[in-house]
Image (cartoon, rainbow, N blue to C red):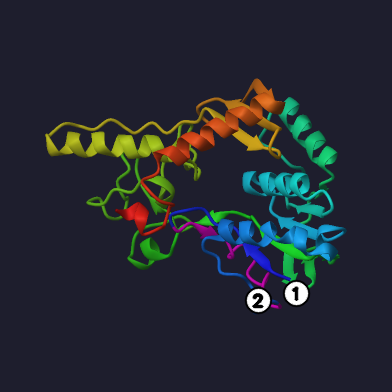
């Protein structure tokens, strides 16, 4: 049974520290973590050729954040013969959404046949399935691990003050609190977002950090006092297969507003966001030699 480890571009890898023994019984046969999304694509591209899996097989998705929700929905829609189980330690899926959005999300997962297991964190991944912390065992032909991301160990090993996820701790001007001559942005930095909470790994945080740090550095080089960099949010969008989705508009501090898009409109919104992001990349794929040119 392959275990697929999902990873974002630019070196952000899966969090193992939250479940230190999760892979103890299954060290051999884990696919390389980078890039995990490509491993996932290659594995499921040939799943229809595996009749015993495509018809009646089971895929377990561990973690019901945005990546886990989209993965479970996509797999269920594109491979209707699969049984898709979604495991989360939270009380329910979509807990950060407004009630209307959360209700729509849960109904969409039900429609797609995704079996949701709330308050059921995964403890151990085995060659033939997984065990949860409450002692239950579930068989699975594949496990997709989507419990979160952490930064590489480089900053911590270099002596920078970091958070528990390895991100450099910075002040409101994105300057390292331990090495003031260094600035950090994007997923490598734990910035201060509107409302005072640490920034979350997202393009909505990374883009203003990138723009803002240029203004900060320019101000200091010219003897001016820099303004704090404002890191705020506007929406959370979730794909639920190719033709469905939920878009939750938010306050700048990431609290949900009452405005929600659903269905094909939400799917089109998410597609536009993804396409604009892809178009902004340099030539080639992220992490490829060509993109560094």
Quarter where residue 133 is shown: bottom right
Q: Position of residue 284 (x, y in %)?
A: 40, 51
**Secondary structure found at label 2:** loop
Q: Is residue 255 visible?
A: no
Compare residues 171 and 274 and report the one nearer the observer.
274
According to the picture, the residue beneath numbered tag 1 turns out to be: 127
Sequence-wise, the earlier of marks 1 and 2 is 2
- The boundaries of the magenta stretch are 11-25
Provide the residue designation for mark 2. 29
Horizontal side of residue 175 vs 38, given as left or right: left
Where's residue 216, x and y in %? 24, 36
Identified at 41% across, 41% down, the residue is 206
**Image quadrant where residue 20 sits:** bottom right
Pick out the residue farthest to the front: 49
Considering depth in this image, is 3 or 19 the residue closer to the camera? Answer: 3
Q: Residue at x 63, y 44 (%)?
A: 66
Cα–Cα gap, marks 1 and 2: 8 Å
Q: Would you place residue 223 above or below residue 86 in this image?
A: above
Residue 277: within the magenta?
no
Give me the disc on residue 117. none
Compared across the picture, whether 243 is left or right of 255 comes to right
Q: Main secondary structure of the magenta part?
A: loop
| 22 is within the stretch colored magenta | yes
Which residue: 48% across, 43% down?
Answer: 198
Viewer-nearest residue: 209 or 58:
58
- Please identify the quadrant where the N terminus is shown: bottom right
Above or below, 252 against 181 in this view is above
């Amino acid at each position: 049974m392959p275990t697929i480890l999902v990873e974002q571009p630019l070196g952000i890898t899966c969090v193992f520290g939250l479940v230190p023994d999760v892979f103890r019984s299954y060290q051999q046969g884990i696919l390389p973590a980078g890039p995990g999304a490509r491993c996932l694509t290659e594995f499921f591209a040939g799943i229809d050729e595996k009749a015993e899996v495509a018809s009646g097989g089971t895929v377990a998705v561990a973690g019901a954040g945005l990546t886990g929700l989209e993965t479970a929905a996509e797999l269920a829609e594109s491979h209707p013969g699969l049984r898709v189980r979604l495991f989360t330690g939270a009380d329910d899926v979509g807990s950060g959404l407004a009630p209307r959005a959360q209700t729509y999300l849960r109904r969409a997962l039900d429609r797609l046949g995704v079996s949701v297991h709330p308050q059921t964190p995964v403890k151990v991944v085995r060659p033939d399935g997984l065990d949860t912390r409450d002692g239950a065992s579930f068989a699975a032909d594949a496990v997709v691990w989507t419990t979160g991301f952490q930064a590489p160990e480089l900053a911590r090993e270099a002596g920078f003050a970091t958070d528990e996820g390895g991100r450099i701790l910075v002040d409101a001007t994105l300057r390292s609190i331990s090495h003031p001559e260094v600035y950090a942005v994007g997923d490598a930095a734990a910035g201060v977002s509107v409302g005072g909470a640490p920034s979350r790994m997202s393009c909505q945080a990374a883009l203003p950090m990138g723009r803002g740090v240029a203004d900060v550095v320019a101000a200091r080089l010219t003897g001016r006092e820099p303004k704090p960099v404002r890191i705020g949010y506007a929406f959370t969008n979730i794909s639920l297969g190719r033709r469905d989705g939920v878009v939750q508009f938010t306050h700048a501090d990431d609290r949900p507003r009452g405005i929600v898009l659903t269905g094909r409109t939400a799917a089109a919104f998410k597609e536009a966001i993804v396409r604009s992001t892809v178009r902004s990349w340099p030539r080639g794929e992220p992490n490829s030699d060509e993109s560094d040119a």
